[in-house]
Amino acid sequence: MPHQKISEHEDKIYYRTKSLCPECETLLPAAVFARQGGVFVGRECPHHGYHEGLICSDSGWYDRLPDFNVDPTPPKNLKNKIVNGCPDDCGLCQAHQQIAGTATIEISNECNASCPVCLADNKKTFSLSAKEVHGMIENLLTLQDTVGFVTLSGGEPTIHPELFGILDCLKRPEVGRVAINSNGIRICTDDAFLDRLATYNNIYITLHFDGTQAKLVRGVTHEFQMKALTRLLKWGIPVVPSVVAVKGLNEPELGEMVKNLLIMSPAIRTVMLTMMCYTGSHGSHYQGQSPVKRLTALGAIEAMELTTQGLIKKTDFLPLAFSNPACVTLAYYLVDEGEITALYPLGDMNEVIKQTKNKNLGDLTFELETLFTHIIDHIYAHPKKFADGEKLLQKFKRLMQTLFPDGKTISNAERIRLAEERIKGIYLYQLMDKYNFDTSRLSKCVCQHLLPDNRIIPTCAYYSYYRKKDPRFN
Ligand SMILES: [Zn+2]
Ligand SMILES: [Zn+2]
């Protein structure tokens, strides 16, 4: 069915940008607009006609995003001048206003699986050395003083012969946490590997975990993914289950699954939902799925609200202000005695936004004490607003007592660990692909790909625009 083109009179146009033609992948002038409750990016290719892609399924939510546009922390020493704009000039280019919160390194393009959905391209043509990875981090640190997260991706990082050498070179004060993306195959069988992994205290595993239909997403069964998860928990290795959320496939079970994961174990730190992204060798033509009627972050939240009878609900979530607010949506929960309590709705929203302003994901080092004191005061001050106010207060008092025990000093690292075991996030990522690409979002991109030639490229631009030009894949 052909789309109705953008109408200056009938549609609400937010801004002009550039997007890709999904057929020839040329960058084209585009507009972001609202129509019938959804937000789309539309553009016309002289050769392939008009295309539009869904950005957000809730225009009311989208209208609030400018409130979350906080002052960024700009990278230093950006050399690439803007001639044709980002992504053409990128590496990073001078369009960038925000440092990387997550720097991703594809350490090889070799994998021991063949997932039906794969955002990478596993051609077995390269493998980085620890020395190269060290050089890439040194280069990143000329642009910013620290980086919250480094994600090792691939390929399958756990089969990289120099994985531990790479982890050693990432043990440095400028690097916060190291996330290792994994399909769980090696984790399921190799005890010695887990023994060694468990000696690193700055890592966690972002483990593929996709629900009962996992086989259709990652090619392995739900039982297999559960086995990998159970083994990581047994070894005490922190895990962030990483779900590809697909419309109509695992969408109906997201709510129950996420809730169960949050309460399952202190070693499960947070749950990450990546909205199905139509890119990479096995993602760009995912069968039976429509990139136009795709599952959006707001769609996934609505599905979770419906299936958990409101235990997880839309008002629990806020856009992440650190990134472009359209890219990441998140909620934090206090997990206490098998129950989850959403944090954001408990405070005064203006105060919460002030407290979390320009903080990276999971950054529990910020003024925790101030935020929780604010929440406790807010519950005290509004006894009628919270049905089970007394029970809530008890939960927060237990939390404060754990994090700031009377007459006992605990180290900051210990406090962060205790906080991470009790305050957990649900993060929803809305990556861009050639269907919903919007170049204006790149300048505040906080997920950046590091390349061995020292270029740094926003991850979405790398997936949709640069990987096919990356000489390592040819
Ligand atoms: Zn075209
Ligand atoms: Zn750029």
Image: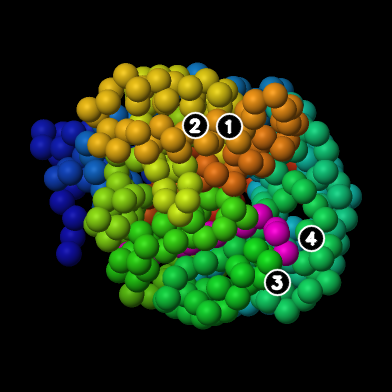
Residues under numbered marks 2 and 3 in contact, where contact means CB atoms less than 8 Å apart = no
Q: Residues within 10 Å of mark 1 (few under 14, many from 20)?
A: few
In the image: residue 336, left or right of residue 104:
left
State whether residue 199 is above or below residue 352. Answer: below
Q: Position of residue 372 (x, y in %)?
A: 49, 27
The residue at which mark 2 appears reads as 397
The residue at which mark 3 appears reads as 187
Q: Front-most of 376 and 205?
A: 376
Q: CA distance from mark 3 to mark 4?
A: 10 Å
Where residue 137 is drawn, which disc sits there? none
Q: CA distance from mark 1 to mark 3?
A: 36 Å
State whether residue 274 is above or below residue 362. Answer: below
* Residue 288 appears in the figure: yes
Residues under numbered marks 1 and 2 in contact, where contact means CB atoms less than 8 Å apart = yes
Res 352 → quadrant: top left
Secondary element type, mark 3: helix
Res 188 → quadrant: bottom right
Q: Is mark 2 within 8 Å of ligand 2?
A: no
The residue at which mark 1 appears reads as 401
The residue at which mark 4 appears reads as 197
- Point 49% across, 56% down: residue: 263
Q: Position of residue 313 (x, y in %)?
A: 30, 47
Kind of residue sitting beneath label 2: Lys
Q: How is the image coloured?
A: rainbow
Tag in front: 2 or 4:
2
State whether residue 130 is above or below residue 124. Answer: above
Secondary element type, mark 1: helix
Q: Front-most of 35 and 386?
A: 386
